[in-house]
Amino acid sequence: MDEQGKKPEWSPEECDAEFTTRVIGHGPHGRGSNGDNSDEAKRRPTSGPQRQVRPRELTVDQYVRGVLDGDRSILARAITLVESNSTEHQEMAQQVLRQLLPHTGRAIRVGITGPPGAGKSTFIETLGCRLVDQGKQVAVLAIDPSSSLTRGSILGDKTRMERLSRSAACFIRPSPSGGTLGGVARKSRETMLVCEAAGFEVVLVETIGVGQNEYAVRSMVDFFLLLTIPGAGDELQGIKRGVMELADAVAVNKADGDNKVKAETARGELAYALHYLAPVTEGWHPGAFACSAATGEGIDELWDVIEGFRSQTEASGVFEKRRKSQTLSWVHMMIEDYLKSLFFNHPEVAAALPQIEKSVVNGELPTVAAVESLLKLFKK
Amino acid sequence: MDEQGKKPEWSPEECDAEFTTRVIGHGPHGRGSNGDNSDEAKRRPTSGPQRQVRPRELTVDQYVRGVLDGDRSILARAITLVESNSTEHQEMAQQVLRQLLPHTGRAIRVGITGPPGAGKSTFIETLGCRLVDQGKQVAVLAIDPSSSLTRGSILGDKTRMERLSRSAACFIRPSPSGGTLGGVARKSRETMLVCEAAGFEVVLVETIGVGQNEYAVRSMVDFFLLLTIPGAGDELQGIKRGVMELADAVAVNKADGDNKVKAETARGELAYALHYLAPVTEGWHPGAFACSAATGEGIDELWDVIEGFRSQTEASGVFEKRRKSQTLSWVHMMIEDYLKSLFFNHPEVAAALPQIEKSVVNGELPTVAAVESLLKLFKK
């Protein structure tokens, strides 16, 4: 550690040399020059002469200016800041976000979900490349709130999204790892905002893993697409309960070659089933479509549907209304998360809970009495 | 007020004569003799010589013994105690419930929902009478968490459920009025337990009003029935979003006369749509049925389905597993309700919330920063 280093403004008062920084110039040694490929930077062996080289720390203003200028290197670092679990980084991240906020909101946010094997990555690769070819800047984010560690699924994806990941107009970011206060979903939401401030016009959010992530993604996007695969009847039950009701469109992927007829049948059945579900977006009737990420067939048409959705809901005011209510519900979700962790981590509550729950389940204690005794412990 | 009255054990220490009681004998003057018709008791003019007559107060043991003996008069009063918003009554109610709990759980709990006009009351009347004819004891409860006042819908129902309400083996209870700690749904759940302890073998819970009551009812019953009416295509969209996914069966009512063909078509379409929804009860595939509450056609068959559901899920352990998880989730729901009211009723939070929410919605304040400032106020 360089003892002549300077402590950055955001370092905690009681901290020691671990927060000092060395000002180093732009160049091949700074981590900042590694572009968005911070994973590679992390994997670089730490032995050898480069060991002492630490990335230049940025100020809030530098982060803000860099992101607004579309500097990929600073964008990647800003996202790392947003994703950091350290209190100091989180505080700085909030200052950065506050300044970026006026520059956010212009992208169309599209969530993409589907059962394993539906071909989400190939679909995103094909769609993303087409959008880039149209001159659009595309950010791809992954969200996996069920994982407390980066499972790296999107790293696998990055290999599959070979062409897209090489494109200068595209930015692919894996799922952040666990944290507090709203957790992974909160981080993904803020990452999305940072990308918007950096000028990305399309944000594709891919759901990864199992659990409640469809709801988390639905609550941060404008348009939610359910991707599925052709299969006779029962195979379609692979679609998780409740997910079809969240979708603004369902697309049967892999509608190519021998699959084409099966895909069309599946599409018809899904269209029929959608008929029974009230639309998730006011005034918009979700349709069922067929496409092939492999051949590209139907992909442009699907994007036209998304564009049409945007025009229609912007005109009706539903677009803006949903965004506002999404923002508010994020505030409420985070507060609820906090309150629950406050309660269930309370030492006396945590100690008494297993026995009380057991008594309730065994029918020895009425639920209200159980709640009252827990509240008594909490209020102590 | 009788100044020689005795204060009951459960009266608050600081209370005055308003809690004294007069011990009066069983007989036509005691409110306890009014059976379950406490509404009538309330409506009785309070002028005249009867004005001084107050119901004999019961002890916890008297409540418990009366309910277990199936005494209708005491059952009605026990439910009134459970529904009371007074802290003292609630404490006593919990003592009563604690003793009743070992005698609960033997009934089959059936929730019934459906759009207005689906004929829920007629259906319950017909089904209830058949069950009573089979020698079963039937309790009918209504739940309407959206109402803070007894809207009296089930009073209208009671007129429509004319035959059933006259039956000695049947007990009909309107929706309780508002309250705290889990509110109306909590009260309905405890009323259900009291009815079970009194020996009722079937509890039919009817959803009334709009809002989230389907979820509240689903979380307290074993079997959830969605009642609907025949109509071409779009009319079926009257079914609220998400409700079909909660159902263990869908029944098309009014399948009689000219409606019969339409009802059969609707049944077929619903069966098809159900095919796409993962079952809400593990291992049980929800079916679509047609019936007529007016002619009675299909009602016995529908009950057979419910009986079959019970045997199958009891054998597989799903029945017991769901009841246990329902009980636990009630505890958690009540705790969350409490925490939220604690937070949002905090004077400083309540004062600052509107401005903070406005700043968030207008994009001036990041959501995390908003949450943090609210938490700071809360922790003060």
Image (cartoon, coloured by chain):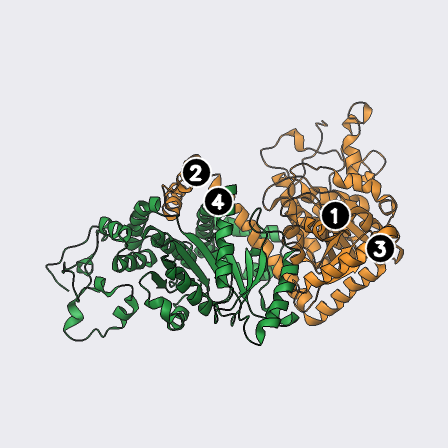
Chain colours: A green, B orange
Of circles 4 and 1, which is in front? 4
- Amino acid beneath label 3: Lys
Of circles 2 and 4, which is in front? 4
- Amino acid beneath label 1: Leu
Q: Do badges 3 and 1 share one subunit?
A: yes
Return the residue at label 2.
Answer: B353
**Mark 2 residue element:** helix
Of circles 3 and 4, which is in front? 4
**Mark 3 residue element:** helix
Q: Residue at x 54, y 72 (%)?
A: A256
Q: Do badges 4 and 1 share one subunit?
A: no
Marked residue chain, label 1: B
Name the N-terminal-most of marks 3 and 1.
1
Q: Please tell me which residue lies in front, B105 or A125.
A: A125
- Are circles 2 and 4 on residues that touch, CB within 8 Å? no
Q: Do badges 3 and 4 share one subunit?
A: no
Return the residue at label 4.
Answer: A314
**Label annotation for residue B260:** 3
Q: Can residue B5 be spotted in the picture?
A: yes
Residue extending furthest left? Answer: A4
